[in-house]
Amino acid sequence: MNKFTEEDVRYFANFARIAISDQDAAQFSELISELVGFGDVLNEVDTEGVKPMTHPLQLYNVLRVDVPQDVLDREEMLAGVEEHEDGMIKVPNIL
Amino acid sequence: MTLMKKTATELQTLLHNREVSVKEVTEDSFKQIKALDDKVQAFLTLTEEDALARAEQLDNEPLENRGSLFGLPIGIKDNIITKGITTTCASKMLENFVPVYDAAVVEKVHEAGMISVGKLNMDEFAMGSTTERSAFQTTHNPWKLDRVPGGSSGGSAAAVAAGEVLFSLGTDTGGSVRQPAAFCGIVGMKPTYGRISRYGLVAFASSLDQIGPLTRTVEDNAMLLSAIAGVDHRDSSSSSKEIPNLIAGLTGDIKGLRIAVPKEYMGEGVAQDVKESVQAALTVLESLGATWDEVSLPHSHYASPTYYAIATAEASSNLARFDGIRYGYHPENAKNLNEIYLRARAEGFGTEVKKRILYGTYALSADHHEDLYVKAMKVRTLIAQDFASVFENYDIIVGPTSATTAYEIGGVVRDSLTLYTNDILTVPVNLAGIPAISIPCGFSDGLPIGLQMIGKHFDEATLYRVAHAFEQATEHHKRTPSIGEGQE
């Protein structure tokens, strides 16, 4: 892929849940085409047999008993929520 | 003269002898901020009332209960959350966000008796390297006000350089502590991934992000790192590896130290004045008993595209939480749930953030996941292996922190080769998860130049020891910008 078209912008913006105007589509098409070209350079590297590095450290799962810890207060948590009622967050009807 | 140009140790002596009180130190910090920050624009939020109340309280603390950072002012980058104090990430998305708990590092600086004076400007969600991408203001470099302070921790670096605070916390995902430290002529450390808990840091790229201290001297920096490092059960990637006594390690002795200088870090794109400063620094290190050789980190050239693929992929996932419902920007009169999402994110995020989310979404999409995201993770392995093989024979790696000195604010198209080289110098360290420090090593045309030293995993101690020895052998750290002079 060489050119990130305006159609591509709309396609991926839909997954990312970002509204896109016509002006945005043109702008991001140009900006992201540059990045796509930049990323193509990676094809030069021979990665045959190389394992992907998912994390900078070797991590191991550490398990603990499933008892709630560091529980934040619900009222405090809701203080920053724009719309809520009876301890629940309100959203528009989805059905 | 302001107290903000002293070192932590000097201030501790004054506090101990009751020559100044914690309240006076705090007041001095706010006096400096009021005198200078109209020009520097480092702070987004000040917490003067809380800070002074806390200072008065701390003045009653018996001397024997006080540690080396007790009563000293600190500024916090605005992507580190602070209970009851607005935390914006310099984004319209979080303009009115008031967190209900403190980040682990904020708890720790408070436990050490430090006084938080406010929140510092940055590029929106830490995406940028000039602090021009803040949604609210552009921070100016205290050395020359028409220059950028670097970024994304530009507010953190500028506030320390201007003498508004002694300490600040920044974050470094691809160079965001080291490059602004270099541009502002101060000391900035990106510790090993896992050294410091990221609990309460608003995530940008979780496998790369690390919090780091910014200070004027190496000793102050080591003190702050010692205070904030350590394992935390709330961040499963934080390490329980023991932290050596970093201050006791500042012996000035670097005899026999083996330094590697990657040819890729001194190549085309690095400005002549920067190269000369780094060469001069190597001569100083030699005179202290170190030796150096040129080496190669052959995959450096690929670090930047690797970084952009991985960092944006992780960001596209991390920033999905900003849905306009639970916190943050909430669009008015949205008709349905999807419209809330679409509008909150379109209206709340700036262009750079949207661009990176879109590219990251593309990198993770079914059609491109293998050839871009997984490919980048494989190249990341090769980049980490480059470092590992150099560290078989050398103790540290030395090079410039940035290819040039600070750019002009609003500078039109910056030479892409320069920007690309700048990334080469800092992002490989994050990809490998190793520590690196930037310290001042010279000036060109009145602007500071930064020397970068890169170490082995969890070996911050060697970096501090070498940085301290270099600092004590040179005068660069004694220069401060003229903007702070005359504040009696």
Image (cartoon, rainbow, N blue to C red):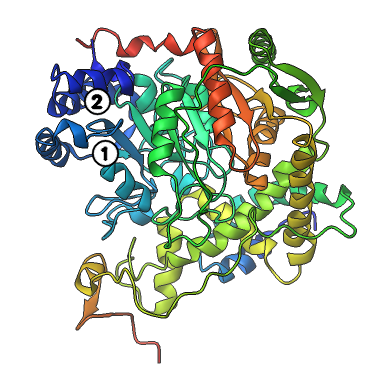
Q: Is residue B214 visible?
A: no
Disc 2 chain ID: B
Seen in the picture, residue B293 relative to A8 is either above or below; the reply is above
The residue under label 2 is which amino acid type?
Ile
The residue under label 1 is which amino acid type?
Gly
Read off the residue under disc 1: B118
On residue B188, the disc is none
Lower position in the chain sequence, tag 1 or tag 2:
2
Number of other residues with Cα within 10 Å of mark 2, as a class: few under 14, some 14 to 19, many 20 or more: many
Count of labels in the image:
2
Q: Tell me what residue is drawn at x 64 percent, y 48 percent.
A: A31
Residue B163 in the image, given as x and y percentages of width and height: 32, 20
Residue A66 in the image, given as x and y percentages of width and height: 41, 80
Residue B173 in the image, given as x and y percentages of width and height: 55, 45
Residue A6 placement: quadrant: bottom right
Q: Is residue B332 visible?
A: yes
SS for callout 2: helix
Residue at the bottom extreme, as displayed: A95
Left or right of B240 on screen, residue B269: right
- Nearer to the camera, B32 or A62: A62
Residue A95 in the image, given as x and y percentages of width and height: 40, 92
- Nearer to the camera, B487 or B353: B487
Read off the residue under disc 2: B33
Distance of label 1 from label 2 (alpha carbons): 10 Å
Q: Tell me what residue is drawn at x 53 percent, y 40 percent.
A: B191
Image quadrant occupied by the N terminus of chain B: top left
